Image (spheres, rainbow, N blue to C red):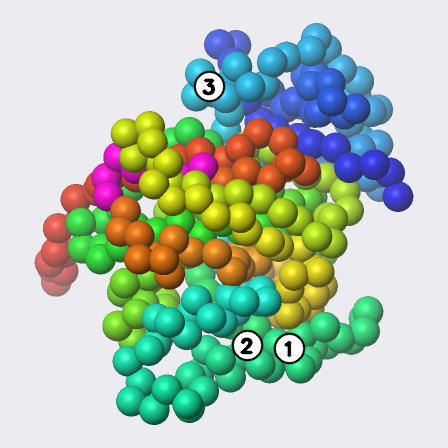
Amino acid sequence: MSAPFRLAQIRREDGRAVVATIDNICRLVRGVTTVLELAQAAIAAGRTLREEVEARGFDAPVDLGAILAAGNVLSPIDHPDPSHVMVAGTGLTHLGSAEGRDKMHKDLADLSKLTDSMKMFRLGLESGRPAPGEEGVAPEWFYKGDGATLVPPQGVLPSPSFALDAGEEPELAGIYVNGPDGQPWRLGFALGNEFSDHVTERQNYLYLAHSKLRVSAIGPELLVGDLPADVRGTSRILRDGTVIWEKPFLTGEANMSHTIANLEGHHFKYGLFRRPGDVNVHYFGTATLSVSDGIVTREGDTFEISSEPFGLPLVNSIGRAAAPWPVVKAL
């Protein structure tokens, strides 16, 4: 296996470009403007992403940190038609994640009785790590939206006015492109903030679907290559420039009750997610939530999610979006 490297998409005065960070040198990739274009070219040529990048060659080095600070780093994957991007995820996949979720369901009269969340978590522990090529137990699955819900790094995460919470979820996101025959290809992994409404979910676990219908963010960089088994990072919340909450998070298969392959298999077993040319962004879950520590976020707070293998941190602030009650008219 070749050593991992990172890809990012940037906005320049003369248009878009793709940059690759290999051996700690970040350079423009020649002849390509999007990661999707790069991936589709690699699939057509029968090459890996690294082989495609190296075949194209490089232009001048760039300072990706400065470009990010200027707000010109885009999400590491997108599509000309956002409706062809599926953003979804799986929960109760990480060791310890059941504790945080179970706290949300503490309204049960009999605390000695397993909640549905704990039952689902137990199933993952028992059958979520099958042998390669075999099918394990299905995880919890949720839908977040299409590509229009992806907010770029440094962008504002608008929380709708009907929301009861605006909470972070520091996660890994798998990034996929379907080939012309519908074969899913994993491009790599990115840091993600799977922004959710945990207070709405706390009311009743059947509100999970509602709590997940929010924007989210991935990036700034896409890690291409093998994912480390043990991924360690830090999740922070800043208010007026001061850290009000900070906690380490663990991910990677060493810290999960499911294998990545099992989670991928249960997502892509549905033909709807294998439509040729479509992009899939799939969140793999987390065990670390500020809401579990009693943190109440507010407009203007900033989330910062970082992990060394993924390069630059993912930073986004909380905004507010008016969401008036819709009135449906008959034709």
Magenta-colored span = 298-304
Q: Secondary structure at mark 3?
A: helix
Q: Are marks 1 and 2 in contact (CB under 8 Å)?
A: yes
Residue type at tag 3: Ala
Q: Residue at x 73, y 18 (%)?
A: 25
Query: Magenta stretch: residue 90 in it?
Result: no
Q: Crowding near pointer 3: few (<14 within 10 Å), some, many (20+)?
A: few
Image quadrant holding the N terminus, namely top right
Q: Which is more N-terminal, label 1 or label 3?
A: 3
Q: Which mark is drawn over residue 69?
A: 3
Give the image location of residue 189, x and y in percent: 64, 45
Q: Residue at x 52, y 14 (%)?
A: 66
Give the image location of residue 251, x and y in percent: 62, 55
Q: Find disc 2 in the rendering and name its residue.
A: 121
Q: Which mark is drawn over residue 125?
A: 1
Identify whether 313 is placed above or below 116.
above
Q: Residue furthest right?
A: 1
Residue type at tag 1: Leu
Q: Secondary structure at mark 2?
A: helix
The reply, left or right, for residue 106 in relation to residue 28 is left
The reply, left or right, for residue 265 in relation to residue 145 is right
Q: Crowding near pointer 2: few (<14 within 10 Å), some, many (20+)?
A: many
Q: Is residue 243 visible?
A: yes
